[in-house]
Amino acid sequence: MSKKFTIHFRKLTHYKYQLMENYIHATSITLQQECCIDDFVALKKDGQLHIFKGYAWDGPSGPTIDTKDFMRGSLVHDALYQLMRKKQLPVSYKDYADKLLHDICIEDGMSKFRAWYVYHAVRLFGKGAIKPDDDINNT
C-alpha cells in the first residue's frame, strides 16, 4: 500500500495558496551547498526540499483546474522554479522539476493522460517562469 501524502494550505488574494505547515520532499538533486529563499524554501545538499509554513504559491498554472491531485506537485514545482528564478539553483534543473511535477501528480492520483498534458505544458511554456528576477525587471 502506498503512503498517502497531504499538504495543508489556504487560499490567498495575491497568491492563490499559502502553506499552513512545513513540508519536506525528497528530491534526487545533490548540491555542493544548500540553497534557500528567505525563510520559506531550502534545498539541502542531500536533496531534501524544505518548504516552510507561510510559503505562498500560485498553484497550478495555465488553462487547468486546481484539484487535490495537482496541489502538492504545484507546490514542489513552484518552489524549485523559484529557486531557479532567484539564481539559487541552476536553470538546468528545469527538466527535472517538470518531470517531478508529473510524477507527484500521478502519485497523488491524477490520470496519466492529464499528468502527461501538464508535463508537456510546463515543458513548452514554463521557461519564462524560471527567468531570473533581475532579467524580468530589466526587460
Image (tube, rainbow, N blue to C red):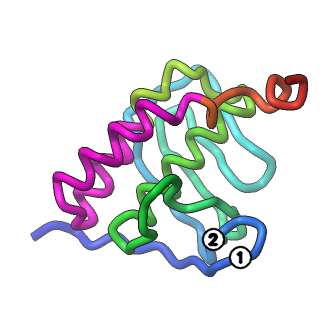
Residue type at the position of mark 2 = Tyr
Q: Residue furthest right?
A: 138
Q: On the image, numbered disc 2 is attached to which residue? A: 17
Residue at the image point whose x is 49% and y is 28% from the top: 94
Q: Which residues are magenta?
A: 98-127
Residue 87, position as x, y percentages in the image: 72, 26
Report the front residue among 49 and 32: 49
- Relative to 108, does residue 99 appear above or below in the rendering? above
Residue 136, position as x, y percentages in the image: 81, 29
Residue at the image point whose x is 64% and y is 79% from the top: 11
Q: On the image, numbered disc 1 is attached to which residue? A: 12
Q: Secondary structure at mark 1?
A: loop
In this picture, residue 107 sits left or right of residue 45? left
Q: Residues within 10 Å of mark 2 (few under 14, many from 20)?
A: many
Q: Secondary structure at mark 2?
A: strand
Residue 4, position as x, y percentages in the image: 27, 73
Quick one: quadrant of the C terminus? top right
Residue type at the position of mark 1 = Leu
